[in-house]
Image (cartoon, helix red, strand yellow):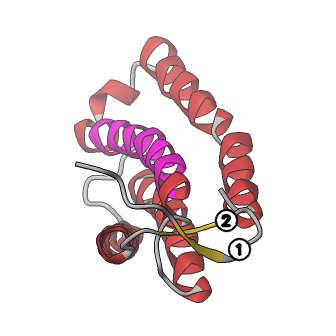
Amino acid sequence: MTSQSRRVAGIVLIVFPTVVFGGVSVLTLLVHDPTYADNALRQDLWRAGHAHAGVLLLLTLVVLRYVDETGLSEGTRWYVRLAVPAAAVLLPIAFFLSVLSPDATPPTPLVYLAYVGAALLVTGLLILGIGLLRAQGQVVDGGGERRAVAAEGR
C-alpha cells in the first residue's frame, strides 16, 4: 500500500467511530423518543443512511488495499481513492438530511445527493475493477513507483 492510500485509510478509520455514534443515536431515538417510530419514511431513511455509511467505509478500506495494484495513472488512482469514501459520506447525508424534520413526509431535495454518491461509487468501483483486470503483473510499490511482478504459475 502506498503512503497515499495509507493516509486515506487512516482518515477513514478515524472517521469510522462516527458511524458507531450514529447507531447509538438511532437506538436512543428508538428507545426514548416515541415520535421517532411515527414517521416510517424517516425511520427507513435513517436506517439506510447508517447501514450505507458502515458498509461503504468498510468497502473503502478494501478499495484502498487494491488500488495500488493497478496500472492506473496516479490521477486516476486518486479518483478511486476519493470517490468511494465520498460516496460513503454523500449517500448517508442524503438519507439523513432529506428527512431531518420529524414530520417530513416527502424527503427534501437533499435526497438527490444520493444519486451523486451512487455515481461516484459506481465509477470508482468500475475504474478499480478495470484497472485490476488490466494490470497484468504490475503493482505500485510503497513509493508510488510501478514495478513488474513475477507471473504466478498455474
From the image, give the main secondary structure of the stretch colored magenta: helix
Image location (x, y in percent) of residue 107:
31, 61
In magenta segment, residue 62: yes
Q: Looking at this view, is 148 or 23 the one in front? A: 148
The secondary structure type at the circle numbered 1 is loop
Quarter in which the N terminus is drawn: bottom right
User: Crowding near pointer 1: few (<14 within 10 Å), some, many (20+)?
Assistant: some
Q: Amino acid at mark 2?
A: Asp
In magenta segment, residue 58: yes
Q: In which quarter of the view is residue 73 placed? A: bottom right
State the residue at coordinates (53%, 18%).
Answer: 28
- Stretch in magenta: 43-63
Q: Is 115 on the left-hand or right-hand side of 124?
A: left
149 over 103 or under it: above or below: below
State the residue at coordinates (38%, 45%).
Answer: 52
123 over 27 or under it: above or below: below
Q: Amino acid at mark 1?
A: Gly
State the residue at coordinates (32%, 35%).
Answer: 43
Q: Looking at this view, is 54 or 137 the one in front? A: 137
Q: Are marks 2 and 1 in contact (CB under 8 Å)?
A: yes
Image location (x, y in percent) of residue 41:
25, 44
State the residue at coordinates (48%, 82%).
Answer: 72
Q: How many angstroms separate mark 2 from mark 1 (CA)?
A: 5 Å
User: Crowding near pointer 2: few (<14 within 10 Å), some, many (20+)?
Assistant: some
Residue under numbered circle 1: 144
Q: Is 17 on the left-hand or right-hand side of 72?
A: right
Q: Looking at this view, is 64 or 97 the one in front? A: 64
The secondary structure type at the circle numbered 2 is loop
The dot on residue 141 is 2
